[in-house]
Image: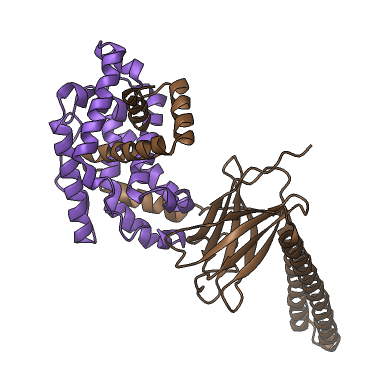
Chain colours: A purple, B brown
Amino acid sequence: MAALALGDIVALELLYDRYSTLVFSVSLRVLRDPQLAEDVVQEVFLRLWRQPISYDPTRGRFISWLMSVTRNRSLDELRRVTRRMRSEDVEDDEPGHEIAAVGHLDDPQAELMVAEARAAVRAAMTRLPPAQRRVIELAYFGGLTHVEIAERTGDPLGTVKTRVRLGMRKLRESLAEYSSWETDRGFR
Amino acid sequence: MTPEEREELLAAHALGTLSAPDAADADALIRADPTANAQFRAYREIADLIALSVPLRQADPALRERVLAAARRGRRWQPRLSSRHAPVYVLAAALAVVTIWAATLQSSLVQLKHQTASLSAVVESDAKRLDRLAGATSGVQEARMLSLQLNSALKDEQSVQRVQADPKAIATNLDQTSASHGAGGQYLSSEAVGASVLVLHDLPMLPLGGAYRVWLEDPLSQLTLAASFVPDSSMGARVALQRDTRLESVKVYVVATSRADDPAATGPVVLMAKLPKRASTP
């Protein structure tokens, strides 16, 4: 990040190679449209380039910030184009073929840590009861509120709230060791 | 509120599923209760990890070059310059005008010399006179600039002393970042003096030609360059910041830059602080 702040284009290339696949995949999961997702990727990385100061290292890890920015920007775009026909169908219905690695990484150890964390998160999500997993995905990738989820699923509001709480608690228990992971070493 | 209701509220807030009124309630709880704050942060970390569960998809390989090309084309972060820097730039612009004027005249004179041999003596004489004139003009401008800089430094030093002497000055410790390398400092703000001072120590060494810059962020997230400085021999500094009366600053950043002569150059944030709200003025 320091090199990026000093205007080093190589640092941007490095960050792009390291995280663009993840940024694109998250955005695609939200938007279900490769063109829109690519627009978000471009905006996210150009924002990083133009305003490196917008990432505040004291507030958390770089990748958390990057995922948060990507998700928020994607949800903004989703609301803008008012495509509300996504997110309830889970996983593999996005366009394109799933690939194995996050990206071309210069640091094999970082790549391994990202891969391990991804595997752990996916396993934890898979272990959730389907109803809990669904409400969490609708909330996270769809940007829906409790009330909107209840309308979407037809479940009572109280049930939705309970499922969110139980699902989040189970994820917290499953991912305790990853809640302070350090995949962004060297970028803080 | 039962512990379960509380957990429900915080987990949902971390996930972003609350309506605006419920989110405001959650924010109030997080601010008031450190335990709730810690619980929310833990859930927030989990929420951030959910993004990693997506199946990976490959973007168009051409996107990489589009992003990098746009980055190369695009302007870097361009801060607004505060009004106290204006005189130096005005003087620099004036100096540039004088230089261009002199150069243009010199060029015309050279042309004349080629055209009319008989006038060469006169032309050369004029050229020398113009050189002297340009030199004298430049000297005056430099002296004015030096005078301005001295006056500014004197005013800054007076502000530093008055703020540090104000017993009611509010001190805010600066937060370290990964680029701090042991640096620290305080932001002192004095209502009575109408100025603030950064007192910094153990700043990291700068590359040759580098400088530190102080940026102030207003509530609209606009950044203003408040000062540039080079640390003293013990890598410390006392920097006076005149108060901007238009908008209250909410954050201060101390940034190391590698190019002191480039106002748009940025660098790593070495120290930063969220500033306390100042007392409302009548």
Q: Nearer the viewer, residue A95 or A134?
A: A134
Give the left or right position of residue A56, taking residue B193 as reference.
left
Residue A186 occupies which quadrant of the picture? bottom left
- Residue B16 spot, x, y in % from top left: 37, 29
Height in image: B140 above or below A52?
below
Q: Nearer the viewer, residue B47 or A176?
A: A176
The residue positioned 26% from the left and 32% from the top of the image is: A29
Height in image: A163 above or below A103?
above
Looking at this view, name the residue that lies furthest to the front. Answer: B2
Residue A90 occupies which quadrant of the picture? top left
Give the left or right position of residue A150, taking residue B137 as reference.
left
Q: Is residue B60 visible?
A: no
- Residue A32 spot, x, y in % from top left: 27, 29
The residue positioned 47% from the left and 61% from the top of the image is: B268
Height in image: A67 above or below A157?
below
Height in image: A111 above or below B16?
below
The residue positioned 38% from the left and 29% from the top of the image is: B13
Q: Quadrant of the N terminus of chain A?
A: bottom left
- Residue B221 spot, x, y in % from top left: 56, 43
Q: Quadrant of the C terminus of chain A?
A: bottom left
- Residue B166 spot, x, y in % from top left: 75, 57
Q: Is residue A164 visible?
A: yes
Exactly how many numbered labels are in the figure? Answer: 0
Residue B187 occupies which quadrant of the picture? bottom right
